[in-house]
Amino acid sequence: MSPIDPTPNRPATQPKYAVDVSKIDEGHVFEVDEVVRLINTSPRSRNYPRDANAFAKWLEHKLWGVGKKFTVRFEKDTIKVLTRNESFEYNKVHFTGYIDRAGVRATHFKAIDASWFDYQKQQDHARLVEFHAAVLKAVRGVRKTFIRDHETNRPESST
């Protein structure tokens, strides 16, 4: 049974998207035609990725709201509720990526020529540059320590 409600016009009291989250389980895939019907945007539209991502975020939020702790991903024009294994890999990679991208953003933030700002904004910029550096140093230190400790405490493989 499809979790999509075929009713195209919804009263203001109905949810943003006509989806019954109680019928969705891990591994569920919303194919392109279902996504198009839900977000009312053509896959050829330049707004399709934005609208599909908004639906994926909404869906994940609603699933978590009913106790279904699933990761939802927009991939290849479809929306997928990841399985546990897929979620493990996806979140592992993306968490590390966020830390790495935070380093890039901090570098870009530091490179801003603050001499053009008024005094207060210059002070804010300097304070935030220091804050970003301290946070990234702490995260990288914890990562290095964790990896080192984890590798030294790993049981020997029997191969």
Image: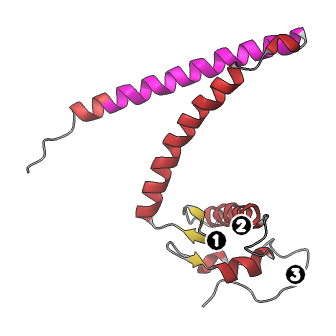
Front disc: 1 or 2: 1
- x, y percent for residue 22: 62, 77
Q: Residue at x 70, y 76 (%)?
A: 35
Residue 22 belongs to magenta span? no
Q: Nearer the viewer, residue 33 or 3?
A: 33
N-terminal of the two: label 1 or label 3? 3
Tag 2 or tag 3, which sits nearer the N-term? 3
User: Where does the magenta region start and end?
Assistant: 119-147
- The residue that appears at 80% across and 11% down in the rendered structure is 123
Q: How many neighbours does mark 3 have within 10 angstroms: few (below 14), some (14-19), or many (20 or more)?
A: few
Where residue 42 appears, as percent x and y from the top left, is 77, 76
What's the magenta bit mostly, secondary-structure-wise? helix
Give the left or right position of residue 12, taking residue 86 as reference. right
- The numbered disc on residue 52 is 2
Under mark 1, the amino acid is Asp
Which residue in the structure is indicated by mark 3?
A: 10
Q: Amino acid at mark 3?
A: Arg
Q: Are marks 1 and 2 in contact (CB under 8 Å)?
A: yes
Q: Earlier in the sequence, mark 1 or mark 2?
A: 2
Q: Secondary structure at mark 3?
A: loop
The residue that appears at 62% across and 80% down in the rendered structure is 31
Q: Please state, as top left, top right, bottom left or bottom right, where the N terminus lies in the image.
A: bottom right
Task: Name the residue that disc number 1 marks.
Answer: 77
Relative to 33, is 42 on the left or the right? right
Give SS at disc 1: loop
Which of the 4 image quadrants contains residue 143?
top left
The front one of 29 and 19 is 29
